[in-house]
Each structure stands twice: as C-alpha cells, then as structure tokens.
Image (cartoon, helix red, strand yellow):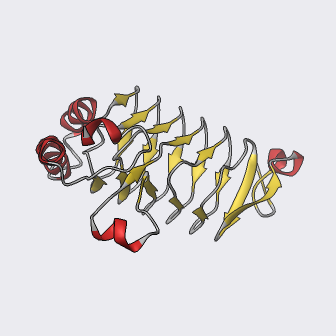
Amino acid sequence: MNKEKMHTGDLYLPGDTEIIKEQTICQDKLHEYNLTKPSELKKRTKLLKEMLGDCGEGVYIEAPFYANFGGKHCHFGNMVYANYHLTCVDDTHIYIGDYTLLGPNVTLATAGHPILPELRKQTYQYNMPIHIGKNCWIGAGAIILPGVTIGDNTVIGAGSIVTKDIPANVVAVGNPCKVMREINEHDKKYYYKNREI
C-alpha cells in the first residue's frame, strides 16, 4: 500500500520493506554506473538504458550521479546532458525533455515531508513529480522542488531555488526563482554579454 502512494502525492512511509527492497536493487545498479571509467562509454549507455525509466538517444550523465531509486523514475528525452553530481530525488517521476542541459550539482527533489512535527516524527513523506521541458538549461547548483514544472526553452540561473512553476521561453533566477525576462531579440545576436554569435 505504501508503494502505490509513492506516485499519488499521498502521505506514505518510505521505510516500507517492499520499497526498501526495490530501492536497494536500484541503488546497486547506480553504484555500478558510478564505478565506470569515462572510457567505458558503451557500458555507461547500456547501464543508463537499464536504470532510467526512459532513456532517449544520446543521453549522457557524468558520474557521479545520485538518485534515490537509481533513476528508475527518471524519464529523459533525447540528447539530455547532465554534468557532475546530478541528484535526482526520484521517489516519484521526473520528466526531462529533449536537448535539455543540466549544470553541475543540480538537484531535482520530488520528495517532501509534512510541516507538522508529529507526522515527520513518524517518518511520513509525500512525492510530487517534476517536469522540465525541451531545450532548457538548468544552471549549476540549481534546486528544483517537488511539483515544479519548467516550460520549454527556459534558462534557470545558477544557484536558483525553484519553488513554483516557470513558463516557457524565459530566463529565471534567484531564491526563490523568479522570471527575470523573456528570451528576446538580443539573444539572437549575442550569446554572452556583448559577444556576438
């Protein structure tokens, strides 16, 4: 019963023996992935296809990679790239669209705990899915919290903490993360400050 509640948003007990058994199998596979050499590209690709819920073509995750369920609840589109130390608290589903880039030390956290101390003391948890659109760039050290959706083509600035949904085609930064501006004509001419494309 606890296992089913992992994906409904309901409170459940994550220490359930059935959940722990499954999680340990996933963690073992993740450990194997993290022990691969950079030169073992074929092995890494094979392991990712076994580990992830969905693994599109050209997905690459730099090791070390951390995930509560070894990426089992992660659904990555084509050509997704994640830099070092990606952390996916994938107690429920995380969806990442094609061509999205994740900087180093990004955290995608689907799990939450009740505010009421008595419930936390009993180790209750709930999970809400994360959706990141196509062709996004999530900057280094960004933290995406449970239930957040980020629209296509959006850039999330380094170090941002994303607590609410962010629309498509914008640059958003800060703690809490807020839309700074839309992607515009300036971006068609300059790739960085005054450096022309």
Q: As rendered, which of 177 and 110 lies closer to the eye?
A: 110
Residue beneath the point at 61% across and 38% down: 135
Q: How many marks?
A: 0
Give the x, y percent position of residue 166. Answer: 69, 50
Q: As rendered, which of 88 and 62 lies closer to the eye?
A: 88
Residue beneath the point at 43% across and 34% down: 76
Give the quadrant of the N terminus.
Answer: top left
Depicted 112 relative to depicted 4: above or below = below
Q: Is residue 135 left or right of residue 195?
A: left
> Residue 108 lies in what quarter of the image?
bottom left
Give the x, y percent position of residue 153. Answer: 68, 41
Instruction: Looking at this view, name the residue that lies furthest to the front.
Output: 118
Q: Is residue 54 left or right of residue 135?
A: left
Depicted 100 relative to depicted 180: above or below = above
Residue beneath the point at 60% across and 35% down: 134
Q: As rendered, which of 19 and 32 lies closer to the eye?
A: 19
Residue beneath the point at 40% across and 26% down: 57
Give the x, y percent position of residue 40. Answer: 19, 41
Give the x, y percent position of residue 69. Answer: 26, 45
Q: As rendered, which of 110 and 8 lies closer to the eye?
A: 8
Instruction: Looking at this view, name the residue that lies furthest to the right.
Output: 185
